[in-house]
Amino acid sequence: MSYEIEFYRLPSGREPVREFLEKLNRQNQLLMSRVIHDIDLLQEAAHAFREPDVKYMGRGIYELRSRAGSNITRVFYFFFRGKRIILTNGFVKKTQKTPPMELEKAHRYKKDYEENHDQLR
């Protein structure tokens, strides 16, 4: 049961998750490879993912948790119309708690995506 992965796109055309991955590639290729691997697994079996690999963050947002050594990343995503997964934004985790600003950004992106794609019905 495969899912379609889509990167959220800002009105400017920027894709926050793609930019996050490009930055990771320059800084830590091992961690970037792990995140890509985890996104691939999510695409193939999102329905089977549970904690500690994925955590529900509320209001329809999930976080994909990746680790390479002591480096930890999070990529937020949500499900849209069945088998589509929209990746909103990602960050390198440096503290125990998820930065509220990053989670709020994911909620804003989700709301924007849903509003713009509901018009297409």
Image (cartoon, rainbow, N blue to C red):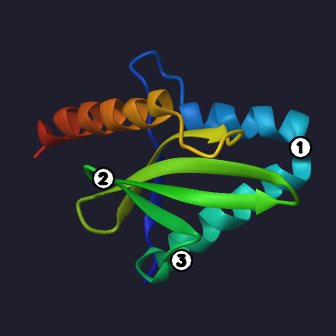
Give the residue drawn at x 46%, y 83%: 48
* Residue type beneath disc 1: Asn
The numbered disc on residue 44 is: 3
Name the residue furthest front.
Answer: 96
Q: Earlier in the sequence, mark 2 or mark 1?
A: 1
Give the residue drawn at x 43%, y 24%: 10
How would you rate the neighbour count of disc 1 (Cα within 10 Å): few for under 14, some for 14-19, many for 20 or more?
A: some
Left or right of 51 on screen, residue 56? left
Q: Which residue is mark 2?
A: 58
Mark nearest the camera among 2 and 1 is: 2
Element at label 1: loop
Q: Earlier in the sequence, mark 2 or mark 3?
A: 3
Circle 2/circle 1 CB separation < 8 Å: no
Gap in angstroms between the C-alphas marked 3 and 1: 25 Å
The numbered disc on residue 28 is: 1
Q: Earlier in the sequence, mark 3 or mark 1?
A: 1
Give the residue drawn at x 84%, y 40%: 25
Element at label 3: helix
* Residue type beneath disc 2: Gly
Q: Name the foreground residue: 52 vs 85.
A: 52
- Residue 78 pos. (x, y %): 36, 54
The numbered disc on residue 108 is: none
